[in-house]
């Protein structure tokens, strides 16, 4: 008790009326119940040094679709129960400091041996497991600041919890690039998001081997902890010590090297040319091999089969450095396509099946959704301007350009997972169909020979290669036409067992939840959408400015959207659910892949402005009401991690309830754990099991800019606005991170 009071005392800062100013001019799209306090309210102590306030706001999102969806939130009267003591008010965060936010971008300190955390509050005794989080840990090398934090080397923190105690450890992902750059304290490799080697274009030209930052996400599978970076291959680590074990190709499923493929002959010629040019980065541990495959940082867990589902991609470009070099300099557009391959691993890490999908032009795919029947991906309306990138003028991200007025496309790729017994008639039939598919050169199948599963399409014909029916034009730039208008009925719908639906132009990074609604015969997709692709040119590298100087008002706002795709005729409805900036969406894992009421995530404090994540949020899809908790305008937060309440040892629960609450083996990041733990009603239906959606906790890492201190906060998912039930201060600041995962196993001392 004394230690907790001392922590609260040292944490206290002034709570001013200026931070709570009312502005009646604002209109809002979400009804918000908001607790704003400068200190975490540790409920065991009942300590609240700053007053709590709440706000309820209402307005409609602008009509942004030819056929807007009348949501449950709109159908409701927005008259959700209110507490008489809650005041109607808005928030003026004019004192929000970009300098405060910038102070979180500092080089991190390792704690290799780890340490016990002085817990403030109470960790529930039934909470046991390990939280991992990945994110950039280097922001400066020598005298050079990185142009974008996503170019920083991966830094893993682990918080192992058992019996109300917590043990922390923190280490860098020691890739070959990390070892080289840290030992010499200078930038030696091109970063994907803006960081170039010193010396201008001539020191970066023709270097397409981007640094594997290993900084985006983390997943535990097959006994190995995998640090993921979507522009490269995974890196394996020890789950207890966080020692780096080396590159991991997932049992040979993934090809090493840069994810560009020019053709076998052109690849060899290009590799020889790159060696002859003595590209600086290649002399410091980099891999100068072409024809590799990059792996998503958003794998999805399927509790029905116990598999982990990934996708990998490769950019195939018809380019010969001997014949096309001059043409490239003159602005010639080169034919390009993106090959995206979904593949599934069993619990031991063996590949069970795969489905390959090809799209003309360039496809930027960060995340996808998984249901019992489909892989769901959104093809964003962007193009790749390859010439400036190859010539060393801009980074890979800066070469991705938004295409005005072109529709985005939702791809529904049929997924039927068949548990295959080699002796069964069904398996033999699938094998025969596989052979027929190969011989007819229509759809081809790849199966690794394991007897524990195959992938099949809904019509019973095994599918691995599909030709994308994308509206993107061929070629690198892919914007030769004036663009495709958004249609209510998509002409591209349902071709070769592959559904494509054009929706309004927008950019989707993260999926929240997807499910099939049998009442409307629609596939429902809840995701975070931006009006357009963020402009990485504006973000420093080209203009010689630091990322922390970015003008956030000029960047598109991340907002929660809903799409309803009619599975019969391809018609669609789409709707902005709330205007508030919202990211890292997730649901209770037992409800992923089915209709859920609550979406958890991180949100901005201001209801309309594009500001960083500074609060934990819970959005009610039925009423439009949003709960928020924040420590204040000086406080910044990372991705909220939903942790299901583990009651698998409770004899009063049925086997179904035990499975849905424990999720043993669901060792994936929060997006995967939440948005794609798709299950049938016979296996893990949260509704059928009677499990409340808010039955669990929310864990997130917060950074207090005034105190220069990071801490892990633990909240009750059923009562976000009540504040943390426990705070775990860390020994040194760890910034904001990107994605994390919760493992229901203890990996501490």
Image (spheres, helix red, strand yellow):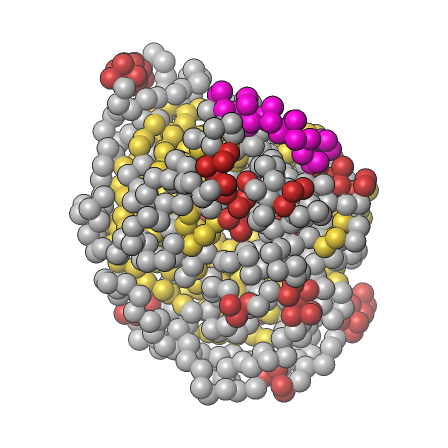
Residue 441 figure quarter: top left
* Vertical comparison of 271 with 498: above or below: above
Per the picture, the main secondary structure of the magenta-coloured stretch is helix
Residue 661 position in % (x across, y down): 50, 46
Relative placement, left or right, of 68 versus 721 is left
Residue 486: x percent and y percent? 26, 56
**Left or right for 210, reference 370:** right
Q: Nearer the viewer, residue 184 or 207?
A: 207
Q: Name which residue lies at 25% across and 34% down.
A: 497
Can the viewer see residue 438 in this picture?
yes
**Where does the N terminus fall, quadrant-wise?**
bottom right
Q: In which quarter of the image is residue 503?
A: bottom left
Q: Is residue 734 at all visible to an observer of this figure?
A: no
Spot occupied by residue 410 in the image (x, y as percentages of width and height): 33, 47
Q: Residue at x 57, y 49 (%)?
A: 394
Q: Say above or below: 49 vs 505.
A: below
Q: Give the range drawn in magenta.
A: 264-291
Q: Which residue is at the front of the view, 313 or 598?
A: 313
Could you say where residue 27 lies in the image, as x and y percent from the top left? 41, 80
Residue 737 part of the magenta segment:
no
Give the number of marks.
0
């Amino acid at each position: 008790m004394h230690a907790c009071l001392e922590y609260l005392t040292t944490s206290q800062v002034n709570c001013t009326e200026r931070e709570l100013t009312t502005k009646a001019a604002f209109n809002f799209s979400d009804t918000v119940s908001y607790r704003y306090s400068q200190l975490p309210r540790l409920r065991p102590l009942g300590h609240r040094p700053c007053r709590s306030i709440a706000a309820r706001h209402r307005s409609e999102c602008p009509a942004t679709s030819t056929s807007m969806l009348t949501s449950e939130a709109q159908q409701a009267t927005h008259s959700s129960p209110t507490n008489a003591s809650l005041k109607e008010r808005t928030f003026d965060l004019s004192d929000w400091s970009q300098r405060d936010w910038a102070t979180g971008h500092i080089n991190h300190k390792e704690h290799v041996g780890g340490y016990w955390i002085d817990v403030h509050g109470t960790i529930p005794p039934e909470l046991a497991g390990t939280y991992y989080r990945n994110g950039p840990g280097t922001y400066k090398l020598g005298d050079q600041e990185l142009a974008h934090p996503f170019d920083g080397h991966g830094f893993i923190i682990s918080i192992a919890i058992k019996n109300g105690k917590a043990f922390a450890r923190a280490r860098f992902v020691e890739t070959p690039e990390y070892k080289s750059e840290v030992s010499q304290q200078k930038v030696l490799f091109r970063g994907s998001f803006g960081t170039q080697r010193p010396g201008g274009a001539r020191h970066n030209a023709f270097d397409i081997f981007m640094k594997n930052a290993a900084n985006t996400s983390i997943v535990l599978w097959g006994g190995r902890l995998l640090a993921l970076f979507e522009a490269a291959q995974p890196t394996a680590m020890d789950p207890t010590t966080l020692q780096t074990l080396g590159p991991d190709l997932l049992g040979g499923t993934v090809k090493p090297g840069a994810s560009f493929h020019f053709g076998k002959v052109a690849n060899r010629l290009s590799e020889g040319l790159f060696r002859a040019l003595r590209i600086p980065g290649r002399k410091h541990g980099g891999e100068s091999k072409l024809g590799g495959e990059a792996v998503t940082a958003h794998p999805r867990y399927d509790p029905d089969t116990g598999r982990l589902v990934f996708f990998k991609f490769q950019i195939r470009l018809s380019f010969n450095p001997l014949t096309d070099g001059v043409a490239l300099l003159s602005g010639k557009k080169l034919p390009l396509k993106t090959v995206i391959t979904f593949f599934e691993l069993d619990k031991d890490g063996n590949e069970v099946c795969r489905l390959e999908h090809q799209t003309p032009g360039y496809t930027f795919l960060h995340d996808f959704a998984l249901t019992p029947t489909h892989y769901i991906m959104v093809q964003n309306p962007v193009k790749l301007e390859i010439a400036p990138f190859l010539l060393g003028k801009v980074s890979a991200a800066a070469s991705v350009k938004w295409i005005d007025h072109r529709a985005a496309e939702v791809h529904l790729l049929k997924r039927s997972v068949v548990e295959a017994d080699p002796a069964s008639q069904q398996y033999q039939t699938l094998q025969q169909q596989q052979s027929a598919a190969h011989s007819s050169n229509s759809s081809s199948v790849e199966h690794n020979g394991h007897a524990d599963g195959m992938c099949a399409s809904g019509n019973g014909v095994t599918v691995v290669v599909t030709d994308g029916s994308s509206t993107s034009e061929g070629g690198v730039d892919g914007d030769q036409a004036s663009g495709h208008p958004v249609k209510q009925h998509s002409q591209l719908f349902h071709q070769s067992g592959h559904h494509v639906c054009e929706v309004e132009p927008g950019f989707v990074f993260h999926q929240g939840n997807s499910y099939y609604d049998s009442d409307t015969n629609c596939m429902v997709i809840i995701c975070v959408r931006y009006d357009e692709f963020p402009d990485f040119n504006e973000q420093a590298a080209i203009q010689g400015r630091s990322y922390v100087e970015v003008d956030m008002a000029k960047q598109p706002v991340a907002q929660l959207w809903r799409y309803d795709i009619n599975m019969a005729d391809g018609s669609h409805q789409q709707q902005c659910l709330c205007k508030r900036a919202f990211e890292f969406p997730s649901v209770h894992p037992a409800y992923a892949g089915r209709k859920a009421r609550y979406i958890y995530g991180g949100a901005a404090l201001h209801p309309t402005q594009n500001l960083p994540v500074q609060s934990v949020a819970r959005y009610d899809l039925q009423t439009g009401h949003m709960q928020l908790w924040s420590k204040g305008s000086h406080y910044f937060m990372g991705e909220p991690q939903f942790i299901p309440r583990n009651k698998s040892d409770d004899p009063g629960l049925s086997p179904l309830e035990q499975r849905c609450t424990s999720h043993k083996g669901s060792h994936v990041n929060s997006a995967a754990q939440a948005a794609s733990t798709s299950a049938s009603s016979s296996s893990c239906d949260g509704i059928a099991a009677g499990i409340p959606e808010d039955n669990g906790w929310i864990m997130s890492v917060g950074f207090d800019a005034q105190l220069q201190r990071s801490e892990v906060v633990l909240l009750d998912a059923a009562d976000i606005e009540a504040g943390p039930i426990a705070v775990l201060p860390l020994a040194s600041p760890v910034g904001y991170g990107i994605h994390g995962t919760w493992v229901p196993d203890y990996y501490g001392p």
